[in-house]
Image (cartoon, helix red, strand yellow):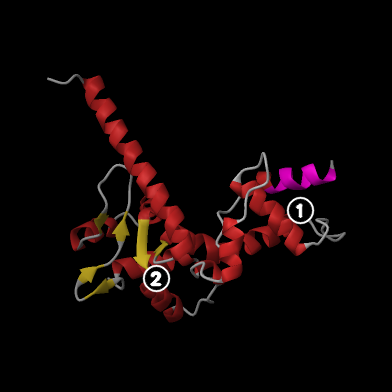
Amino acid sequence: MASDSEHFDRVERTRQRRKARIKRFEEWQREVRRWINFADIAGHYTEEGQSILSIDLLARALIADEFEENGRSLVLFLHPTLPPTRLTPEWIEQLKGVLDKDWGRSYLEYCWIPRRLFERWRDQNRLLSSPYFEPINEPSLVRLKKQPKRRGTGAKTWAVAEARDQLWPGGIPPEGLTAKERDTRIINWMKSKGCSLPSRRTIQRVFEKRRT
């Protein structure tokens, strides 16, 4: 009979494998955009300054079964402690009791919907379309993703430097531009190209290196 530690090790290995698969899926979908993540939707529209709290709209739409077709939920639920699954009516019924709580809302970050359902939901709620949710299929964007990284830099650091040089030839932002405004422009440019988004600390490091 397996000991508690052996059981824990097996569970942890399974969780790590699922976590790695989910990470690969996320990276792939941020290029092909066949599935859209709830956290991406809420984060994007909040950062864009729209007055509607997108996570509330998503929660209400989920409870109202707006992401169903032919009576079947199309919401994909990817959590590292569970096998990949669709949110069944039973799952959604359980979520109804917790979505009004902060910890309950955290479940939404594991939810994905097909792009066509996202676009339908977006239009119903009169939200602006955005290139952030478009697949990377323009030749210029494909070339950008395939360009070799600069020696000694990670993908996000390289992309920040690329955004800096594209936005401000010479790499120097205009005087009077605050760090927050600079970072927002960098992030929006990277979103439009489908790049993974950096932390503000990463952006700061890139500009500090330029100054030195």
Q: Residue at x 26, y 26 (%)?
A: 8
Res. 179 mark:
1
Crowding at mark 2 (Cα within 10 Å: few <14, some 14-19, many 20+): some
Q: Does residue 50 appear anywhere in the picture? A: no
Image location (x, y in percent) of residue 54: 47, 66
Asked if residue 146 lies left or right of residue 104, the reply is right
> Farthest residue in the right direction?
175
> Contact, CB < 8 Å: mark 1 with mark 2?
no
Image location (x, y in percent) of residue 211: 84, 45
Asked if residue 33 lies left or right of residue 206, the reply is left
Q: Looking at this view, is 204 or 196 the one in front? A: 196
Asked if residue 110 lies left or right of residue 51, the reply is left
Image location (x, y in percent) of residue 139: 57, 70
Helix, strand or loop under label 1: helix
- Quarter of the image that includes the N terminus: top left
Crowding at mark 1 (Cα within 10 Å: few <14, some 14-19, many 20+): few
Residue 207 drawn in magenta: yes
Residue 112 drawn in magenta: no
